Image: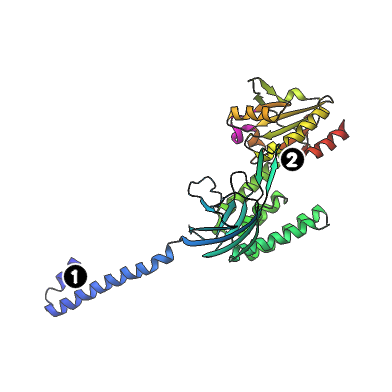
């Protein structure tokens, strides 16, 4: 700029003023061009949303909403339920997975919002267990209006429900599921619904899920949905550890008295390993049936071991007494970060493994009735 003014020192004052005005105008023009472009390069942006909801059935006074998997965040939103109606208002990036629940002991209803206004209809009922002392709120989403993204999700899920009700073989169902997902993802590679649906395709093989994940646009790589796909791939990859016929990975853990229990000592017996926790309602609900199972077969070369994933030992001990568990109980102080949970990729409980006399896995995730049938055939 100094050189410019030096070159212009012999130009008259009027021409110099014209030149200065031109320079100021160009500076102003550059600034405003940058200002205009800011909204286009600032992505993503939060938008205000409203959710108008209705609910029927049995419920308490409040309903809650959180986004993606942020259920532990303090800023999750709650709404009073009045005359079967609830209302949420806030700001978030859209489209986004919104998750509804009634309390900590509640099913979670997933919906997608992509508009300023969304209308949701829900139903719920209370499931009472443990002699009336425990309850589980079985919340379900019946209908969503005002969200094109959720329409994609619910449309596919309706098709899947109909497939599951069909009389074709499990193999044919898996193949139809795979082909339908492939078609969907190819059509909507940039929609969050694609990785959402794929992350729930737990019946597919590792190779199938891996192949379909490659069809998802890379712009979704950091989303909660795609991370859930990676989690499923990890589970499927580790599933060989719990495959039928695989030798169970033995462990040594302390019982309520601090005595170490080694699962190797139960060789020669059919053994049921049950993973649970005092805070897990579904776990506690199945204890009466497991108690009955144990009493029936405990003298017939059959053993049961409960593995607690509690971090609070006192609550674990209280639950043992309250649920009248007479079968062996141990605790992993590292809970879901312990060697057993990591080796078998246990992310949800209850979980169980039925072992034969040689310690090989012959059943995984069985109901008490299924376990009884298998034991009766074996003994």
Is residue 224 visible in the rendered image? The answer is yes
Left or right placement of residue 209 versus residue 26 in this view: right
Q: What residue is pinned by disc 2? A: 365
Q: What residue is pinned by disc 1? A: 4
Write down the region rendered in magenta: 331-339
Residue 172, percent from left and from top:
80, 56
Residue 108, percent from left and from top:
62, 50
Q: Nearer the viewer, mark 1 or mark 2?
A: 2
Residue 191 sits in quarter = bottom right
* Label 1 CA crowd tier, 10 Å (few <14, some 14–19, many 20+): few
Work out whether 314 lies above or below 167.
above
First of labels 1, 2 by sequence position: 1
Residue 354, percent from left and from top:
77, 34
Q: Residue at x 41, y 66 (%)?
A: 39
Q: Secondary structure at mark 1?
A: helix
Mark 2 and mark 1 in contact (Cβ < 8 Å)?
A: no
Q: Nearer the viewer, residue 232 or 256?
A: 256
Q: Is residue 337 magenta?
A: yes
Q: Secondary structure at mark 2?
A: loop
Q: Residue at x 65, y 33 (%)?
A: 340
Q: Is residue 344 magenta?
A: no
Cα–Cα span, label 1 and label 2: 81 Å
């Amino acid at each position: 700029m100094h050189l410019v003014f030096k070159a212009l020192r012999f130009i008259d004052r009027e021409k110099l003023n014209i030149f200065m005005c031109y320079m100021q105008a160009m500076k102003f023009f550059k600034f405003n061009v940058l200002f205009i472009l800011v909204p286009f390069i600032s992505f993503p942006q939060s938008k205000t949303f409203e959710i108008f909801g209705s609910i029927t059935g049995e419920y308490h006074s409040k309903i809650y909403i959180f986004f993606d998997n942020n259920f532990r965040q303090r800023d999750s939103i709650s709404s009073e339920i009045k005359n079967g109606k609830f209302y949420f208002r806030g700001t978030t990036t859209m489209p986004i997975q919104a998750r509804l629940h009634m309390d900590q002991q509640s099913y979670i209803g997933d919906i997608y919002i992509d508009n300023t206004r969304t209308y949701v209809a829900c139903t719920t009922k209370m499931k009472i267990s443990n002699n009336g002392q425990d309850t589980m709120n079985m919340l379900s989403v019946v209908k969503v209006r005002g969200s094109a993204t959720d329409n994609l999700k619910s449309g596919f899920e309706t098709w899947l429900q109909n497939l599951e009700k069909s009389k074709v073989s499990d193999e044919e169902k898996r193949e139809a599921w795979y082909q339908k997902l492939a078609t969907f993802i190819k059509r909507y590679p940039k929609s969050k619904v694609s990785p959402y649906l794929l992350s729930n395709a737990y019946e597919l093989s590792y190779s199938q899920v891996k192949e379909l994940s490659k069809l998802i646009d890379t712009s979704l790589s950091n989303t909660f949905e795609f991370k859930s796909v990676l989690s499923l791939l990890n589970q499927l990859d580790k599933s060989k550890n719990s495959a039928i016929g695989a030798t169970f990975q033995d462990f040594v853990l302390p019982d309520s008295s601090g005595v170490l229990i080694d699962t190797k000592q139960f060789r020669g017996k059919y053994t049921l390993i049950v993973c649970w926790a005092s805070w897990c309602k579904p776990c506690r609900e199945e204890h009466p049936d497991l108690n009955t199972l144990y009493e029936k077969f405990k003298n017939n070369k059959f053993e049961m071991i409960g593995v607690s994933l509690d971090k609070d030992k006192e609550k674990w001990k209280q639950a043992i007494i309250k649920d009248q568990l007479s079968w062996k109980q141990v605790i992993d102080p590292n809970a879901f970060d312990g060697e057993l949970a990591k080796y078998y990729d246990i992310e949800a409980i209850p979980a169980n493994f039925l072992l034969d006399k040689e310690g090989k896995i012959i059943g995984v995730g069985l109901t008490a009735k299924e376990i009884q049938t298998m034991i009766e055939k074996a003994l």
